[in-house]
Amino acid sequence: MTLTRASAWRCAAVLTGIALVVTACETSADDEASGSDEAGDPAAAFEPPDLPMLEEIGAGEGELNILSWAGYAEDGTTDPNVDWVSPFEDETGCQVTNKVFNTSDEAVSLMQSGQYDVVSASGDASLRLIAGGDVEPVNTDLVPNYVDIWPFLKDRAWNTVNGVNYGIPHGWGANVLMYNTQEVDPAPASWSVVFEDAEQQDGRVTAYDSPIYIADAAMYLMETEPDLGIENPYALDDDQLAAAVDLLKQQSESVGEYWADYTKEISAFKTGSSTVGTTWQIIANLAKADGAPVDVVLPEEGATGWSDTWMVGAESEHKNCAYLWLDWIASPDVNAQVAEWFGEAPGNSKACDLTADPDHCATFHAGDEEYAEQIWYWTTPIEQCLDGRTDVTCTDYAAWTQAWTEIKG
């Protein structure tokens, strides 16, 4: 199986600097969590800068500056057989320069420079970019392939504000539970195996090494301790955060390793030093291909995850090329290539007929709306409670970062 992700691609999707975002941007970090939108839509409470959208596409300007996660704009450099940028250049005349970012915080900072025409923004960055005026509304009528994007990815809190679209959905995935099929019996159906029951795999539990992992504990508590009143795992008041921290401190006694490099997680499951913990579907696939006896499950409590959106820079000088790229990257064939290479569910509903692996979409649950509705997509915790509460102040990312340091000791 082809190795698809670089170790830092998504390993630190949000960093401490996020907590320093200006208040206007903090207000924008809306309910990018559950597909059910049960907690309402806090984004409706803020007004993004009044920016125009493109009304028609003219001739390409001959140049396009892309800001992307690694693996989203491949030109054959990484692997000569993996190239969807060169055909785009040949067809449109738009010569691509791609800058890879390693974290969402880095992406936000770079977009503020105004140097980039398009960006592949994850849910923990997209609303900050909108509120900061760094990206502009997108005219989806000018993106023919938009019609084939899965409906459950459209008009969501992380890509749409007050009914205005700000980008083209690209791909998505969940942070699932991986376990050693020989050591964990029976097969787990709940996150309890890494929390309350973690001592059963003492020293062999693994967890994602980031403060955002606190949301995983909060999501578990939301289902198992309803008296805490958690309605959104990214909206925690002081008491709720303390409960999540206590759970994670308890878990830490059984954690053998916090992973940030996916190759190390694969190795740990292959050698047996890790037997259960959070992962990505692509990591499980690679671990299986490497001989590890593992399987994955979406636990009954749900999961955290991500959804990415291609957005147009407000200061872009190459908007025609930008829109040509939006349509290109959303086209069935290209979207299929990206999804397989990166290791995610494609955004285009027709892409599943074009993947090299006929089982790719089934493996990654593409088009499975019921599955997607169980995911709380990454977002940045801020003082304005994302669950709509106004009688308390919620904890921000700085508090989560401090708590994470305490959890790991």
Image (cartoon, rainbow, N blue to C red):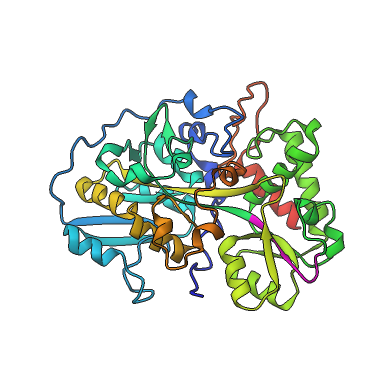
Q: Position of residue 6 (x, y in %)?
A: 49, 68
Vertical side of 221 occupied by 45: above or below: above
Q: Where is residue 269, by image quadrant?
A: bottom right
Q: Where is residue 40, by image quadrant?
A: top right
Q: Position of residue 128 (x, y in %)?
A: 45, 39
* Stretch in magenta: 176-184
Residue at left 84%, top 65%? 202
Task: From the viewer's perspective, tell me whether residue 276 is left or right of residue 305.
Answer: right
Vertical side of 79 occupied by 236: above or below: above
Residue found at the far top of this picture:
391
The residue nearer to you, when weighing 53 against 111, is 53
Task: From the viewer's perspective, tell me whether residue 85 is left or right of residue 153.
Answer: left
The residue nearer to you, when weighing 384 against 4, is 4
The residue nearer to you, when weighing 338 against 164, is 338
Residue at left 59%, top 46%? 371
**Can residue 241 be spotted in the picture?**
yes
